[in-house]
Image: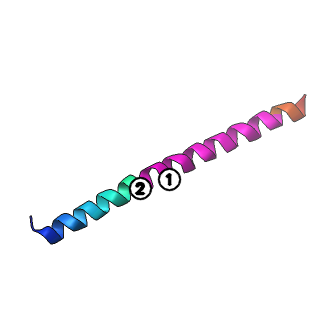
Amino acid sequence: MNANTYSEFADSTKLEIAVGPLVFSELFFEVSLMEISRSNNQMMRR
């Protein structure tokens, strides 16, 4: 494995590490938005 391949591999790993939490927080945000709208609907029906 030469240095060039290694640096490319390290870059892609860094990218995944950086993107992972972003994707997770986006997912969490979507779910919490759904939960909030669901509870708001229940409050409006009462």
Give the position of the C terminus as an image quadrant. Answer: top right
* Residue 34 coordinates in the image, percent (x, y): 68, 42
**Position of 30 compared to 39: left or right?**
left
Quadrant in which residue 28 is drawn? top right
Quadrant in which residue 39 is drawn? top right
**Badge 2: few (under 14), some or many (20 or more) residues near its Cα, within 10 Å?**
few
Q: Is residue 29 above or below residue 45?
A: below
What residue do we see at 23% from left, 62% from top?
A: 9
**Position of 9 compared to 15: left or right?**
left
* Residue that label 2 marks: 18
Q: Secondary structure at mark 1?
A: helix
Q: CA distance from mark 2 to mark 1?
A: 7 Å
Give the position of the N terminus as an image quadrant. Answer: bottom left
Q: Is residue 8 above or below residue 38?
A: below
Tell me which segment is drawn in magenta: 19-41
Q: Amino acid at mark 1?
A: Leu
* Residue that label 1 marks: 22
Q: Is residue 16 above or below residue 7?
A: above
Q: Is residue 8 above or below residue 29?
A: below
The figure's colour scheme reads rainbow
What residue do we see at 24% from left, 67% from top?
A: 8
**Position of 28 compared to 42: left or right?**
left
Residues marked 2 and 1 touching at CB (< 8 Å): yes
What residue do we see at 43% from left, 56% from top?
A: 19
